[in-house]
Image (cartoon, rainbow, N blue to C red):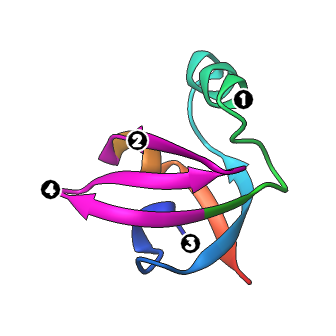
Amino acid sequence: MPLTMLPIGKEAVVNECRAKEDTRKFLAGLGIVPGVFISVISEMKGNLIVSVKGSRLALNKGVAQQLMVNLQ
């Protein structure tokens, strides 16, 4: 399921990123790669604040929709 569907406070594992190569490289630089645990801290107008490896990151809705996750 896309990251935008993950309920606030739930943890999931990133399966794949369906974004363009440039966006995938940007996300990899932030630590968002397949196999990493991610959780949604808050949501505002579709944009997300997520927690990855102890860091908080802001993702816009378009990017978040291209990250596929599985619940843990």
Residue range of the region highlighted in magenta in the rendering: 39-61
Q: What residue would you read off at disc 3?
A: 1
- In this rendering, the answer to whether 9 lies above or below 46 is below
Badge 1 local density, few (<14 within 10 Å), some, or many (20+)?
Answer: few
Percent across and percent down for residue 14 are: 71, 58
Compute the Cα span from label 2 to label 4. Answer: 11 Å
Q: Position of residue 33 (x, y in %)?
A: 76, 42
Between the C-alphas of marks 2 and 3, the distance is 16 Å
Q: For this rendering, which residue is in front, 1 or 43? A: 43
Q: Quadrant of residue 7?
A: bottom left
Name the magenta segment's main secondary structure: strand
Q: Is residue 2 left or right of residue 27?
A: left
SS under mark 1? helix
The type of residue carrying mark 3 is Met
Mark 1 highlights which residue? 28
Q: Position of residue 53 (x, y in %)?
A: 72, 49
The residue depicted at 50 percent of the width and 62 percent of the height is: 3
Residue that badge 4 annotates: 45
Looking at the image, tell me whether mark 2 or mark 1 is earlier in sequence order: 1
* Quadrant of the frame with the C terminus: bottom right
Q: How many marks?
A: 4
Q: Cβ–Cβ below 8 Å for labels 2 and 3?
A: no
In terms of sequence position, does the residue under pointer 1 or pointer 4 come before the other?
1
- Kind of residue indicated by mark 2: Leu
Dot 2 or dot 3, earlier in sequence: 3
* Sooner in the amino-acid sequence: mark 2 or mark 4: 4
According to the picture, the residue beneath numbered tag 2 turns out to be: 59
Amino acid identity at mark 4: Lys
Instruction: Identify the amino acid type marked 1.
Output: Ala
